Amino acid sequence: MKKNIILPLIIFFIFPTTFATAEDYKKTTTKKEPAPAGTEKVKVGSMTYTVPKGTAISSKDGVTVIESFRQHAEKRFLQIEENIARIESQLTRLENQIGQLKQVLDEIKKAQAAQKGSDKK
């Protein structure tokens, strides 16, 4: 008789507690945390990696290869050098355009001054 009472007690009290704790654990482990500044989270297969932005990741035959920090730094440095060269060329182009505009403005001022001088006569 005691065995018949114990079995329902176990079913009603212990099993629901187990499921509730498993659900709480699942909620805390699947919470998505943002990636730190300058990094990104990349998912390859079932694994998630936190890597610097722009890091190359390749996967072949179940082997995941993440670009080393040195390779990533070299690649970024070359990109920055290219950007600086592009900006410098834009700057020289803009300086030339400003010089041309100054010349046109000087010509306009001279023409206006000559026109004022001829109007006074």
Image: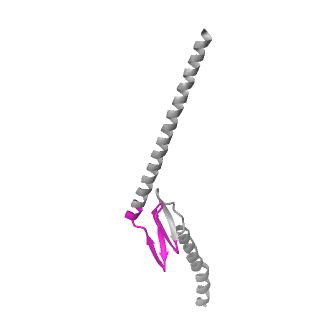
Residue drawn at the location 60% of the way across and 77% of the way down = 16
* Vertical placement of residue 107 versus 94, above or below: above
x, y percent for residue 108: 57, 24
Residue 82: say if magenta. Answer: no
The quarter of the rendered structure image containing the C terminus is top right
Q: Residue at x 47, y 66 (%)?
A: 56
Residue at x 52%, y 29% (from the top left corner): 103
Please tell me which residue is depicted at 42% across the width and 57% down the height of the picture: 78
Highlighted magenta segment, given as a residue range? 44-73
Q: Nearer the viewer, residue 13 or 98?
A: 98
> Residue 33 at x, y = what percent?
51, 62
| x then y, percent, for residue 88 | 45, 45
Frontmost residue, 105 versus 78: 105
- Number of numbered discs on residues: 0
Horizontal and vertical percent for residue 58? Answer: 48, 72
Q: Colour scheme of this structure image?
A: one colour
Picture layout, residue 88 above or below residue 25:
above
Position of the N terminus, as image quadrant, is: bottom right
Q: Is residue 35 left or right of residue 115?
A: left
> In the depicted view, which residue is nearer to us: 76 or 92?
92
Specify the farthest residue to the top. Answer: 121
Q: For the view shown, which residue lies furthest in the left direction?
A: 70
Q: Is residue 102 above or below residue 41?
A: above
Position of 15 compared to 83: left or right? right
